[in-house]
Amino acid sequence: MDLTRRQTLSFSLAGAVGVSTVLPLSHPAAHAAELAADDPFEPLLARAEQQLTGGPFDPVDPDFAAALGALDAQATAWLRALDTSSGRVALWPELSPASSPDTFGQSYPRLRTIALAWATPGTSLTARADVLDTLITSLRFLHTVGYHPNRTESGNWWFWEIGSPRALMDTCVLLRAHLPAEDLAAYVATVARFVPNPDRRTNIPTLAETGANRADKALIVALRGLLARDGSVVALARDGLSDVRDGGRNSLFAHVTSGDGFYADGSFVQHGYVAYTGTYGSVLLGGVGQLIALLSGSGWAVTDPRVDVLYEAVDRSFTPVLFDGLMMDAVRGRAISRERARDHQDGATTVGHIVQLAVGAPEPYASRWRSAARGWIERNLETPYVGLVGIPALARAKALLADPEVRPAERLTGHHVFADMDRVVHRRPGWALALSLSSKRIAAYEGGNGENLHGWYTGDGMTYLYDGDDLDGFGDAFWPTVDPYRLPGTTVDTRPRADIGTGSGTSTFRPSNTVAGGAALGGRFGAAAMELIADGSTLRAKKSWFFLDNAVVALGAGITASDGRTIETIVENRNLHADGSPDLRVDGRRQPQEQGWSALLASPGWAHLEGAGGYVFPDYPEREATSVVRALREERTGTWRALNIGADTGGSTTPVTRRYATLWFDHGVSPTAASYAYVLLPGASAVATGVWHHARPVRVLANNATVQAVEARRDGLLAAHFWQAGTIDGLISSGPGTVLVRRHRGGVSVSVADPGRAAETLTVELPFRVDRVVRADDTVTVVPGRRPVLTVCVGGSRGHSHTADLV
């Protein structure tokens, strides 16, 4: 399934305004109003049409004019290129033959775009009789040669059961007053054949639909029911959201504990094992929100009392992974390889879904989301929201921005551990960092249908650093130009890799490690760990990250391999855009700026990259006498086609070039028990970085195969990940686990997690006196005293944090 195809009205963005002479044909909306009397279906169909066209708007407004012109240009281009000859085998030469699912599956969305331009006032195609005739004959052609009830599914199921029927039903909604009755009946029958209900995969009847697929199908079935004037079908769509058929087992209004859907901790998983909040999760949010709005006030209104689960997901699942309106790549799966769906586009789509949901949501949800959305929209000046969305979302956004009662929310701050999808997000006022992990539970990557061909290391501890002053670090042609063997945060075997995902269908790779995740303390501090068991290599490593107020400390130990190849750990690989040449300083000394420069830095103390921040290489007990760090400036050229050859998402072959500044540890050939330590200081100046290095506000206490630990003295924080039973600075753990202990004026706060999910209980002994318990989770038992002991029942908690406050 392709998520770019699924973003509602993404097809309506492009071009310049132009209005041609309109033939004497009544406008579809006006004609539809005549049919609404005593018809419970027509008002909802009119509402569905407005969801597509956006309803009344001011075409003179520059933002609307741009969106209208964009729609007009795209629709006109496809209309002019459409083959109308009697002997045609396809509507467009590049989508031939039309009998193939991947070509009729792309043809229907193009017809929908033309129909949208025909139905929207102010385009050059509005209400034109010749355009209507072309649409009617084109739909008949596709029905005859490609998509009809007598065919058997072949190829990608998505084109048969979601992509084509959704575009076809949308088109029928727009043209319904002018489609011949027999044509409409034929199209509805076709969709009924391939999408009889939202509950099952038609080509695999034993497979229940889940997550975004279920949401998509529910909306398709609802539109089919409205067009057929069949209330039982509309009810079937509504009930599909709650999975009435299977007693709520796959309800979209329930938290899941495995498989696809929203988890209570904010995780969202699709395809069983993939962290997918930013694409499939967004599709689910948009589809369900649209269906709720569509059926509101009717006899088929959504009344499931558990709809709050969806509302809570906005705050738990989406808000933490939206940064100034862009969607973090760590939760976009294989969509990172799509040229036409970068982080800003997926972010704008999700923001639009949230604003749509806010229209009918109760308080305090609605006000909070509207404030958040205003903040996202107003802060993103690099890629403005108004240029990324179609008329419906634009209309809602402009109303929001014009409302004096809505104040923009500040950037979200805090530490978020999404234990159920192996992701961590740390947010500060000026920056955010997303950490992408993997395990036997969550895939390191997903490929398939020709997408994400170079995603090998995206789940191996990649760190995505987002800077409020440069929102294009990953959206500006990062993926086609970055060295895919040198993703920030990863430890890699430099062996050549073959493309992944070139075949049909999608597949995932899940490594065999169990440890991936960590603990959060007070929503402010955190620690995470991942055992690296490399794919197709003997490389093994123990990696930990510690998240503080202004810094992230990364540690690696036990780095071992025996394949005769060089092993590297990437500190930074920063996109400097097309012509960037910021200063790079090492221990205060400015380095050369020419492209192609490289250097070996023996035991550096710190480095600073202008516009990005500082990098400190701290001492630690196990540090080798010579810690080899390499630096490189380079210009890299690539193509989106090299990453994505998908049938309808394939990238262009046009070369793009970007500059990069790279820092990495060279562990040498087949290292044995190598290690590394570095500190990220996002946004710090060169002076501040040098001061931080000399002041050592954070000490690395241990970095070995037993324990990795840091102490932030100013914060009173001791944070450790134990790989086995051990002790550090008097803190004792009975087994593997992540422990954070903070002493502050109010007492002592403790957080414990078992990211390996192997133990039933974990015992932690603190190195100082505690007299009593102020608060503790039900899973935590405390014996106070001179050496207090916490017994934490971690079994069955799926790696989540257990906390206690003591004095």
Image (tube, helix red, strand yellow):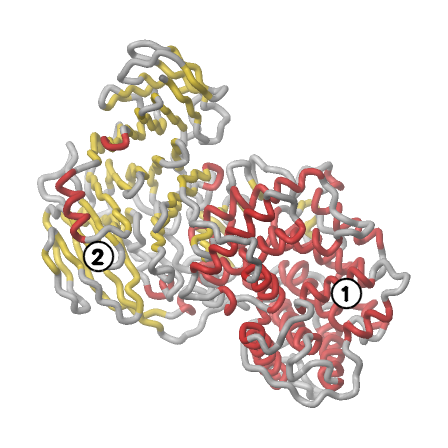
* 394 to the left or right of 306: left
| Residue at mark 2 | 609
Q: Judge from the rendering whether residue 307 lies leftward or rightward of residue 25; answer left or right.
A: left
Which quadrant, please, contains the C terminus? top left
Where residue 403 sits: x, y (%)?
Answer: 57, 58
Q: Type of residue at label 1?
A: Ala
Query: Dividing the picture into quarters, in which one does residue 4 lie?
Result: bottom right
Q: Is residue 505 visible?
A: no
Q: Residues within 10 Å of mark 2 (few under 14, many from 20)?
A: many
Residue at 13% over, 46% down: 605
Mark closest to the chain's N terminus, 2 or 1:
1
- Residue at disc 2, secondary structure: strand
Q: Quadrant of residue 193?
A: bottom right
- Crowding at dot 1, Cα within 10 Å, few <14 / some 14-19 / many 20+, comes out as many
Q: What count of labels does the image hold?
A: 2
Query: x and y percent of residue 360 in the render?
Result: 67, 51
Classify residue 725 as left or right of residue 188.
left
Residue drawn at x 50%, y 19% is: 778
Q: Which mark is residue 177?
A: none
Residue reaching furthest to the front? 404
The answer to whether any part of residue 139 appears in the image is: yes
The residue lying at 28 percent from left, 64 percent from top is 576
Q: Residue at x 30, y 18 (%)?
A: 766
> Is residue 140 positioned above or below 446 on the image?
below
Q: Position of residue 634 (x, y in %)?
A: 23, 66
Q: Nearer the viewer, residue 290 or 84?
A: 290
Query: For this rendering, which residue is in front, 2 or 113?
Result: 113
The residues bearing labels 2 and 1 have C-alpha atoms spaced at a distance of 55 Å
Q: Position of residue 654 (x, y in %)?
A: 39, 76
Per the image, the residue denoted by label 1 is 46
Q: Amino acid at mark 2?
A: Leu
Mark 1 element type = helix
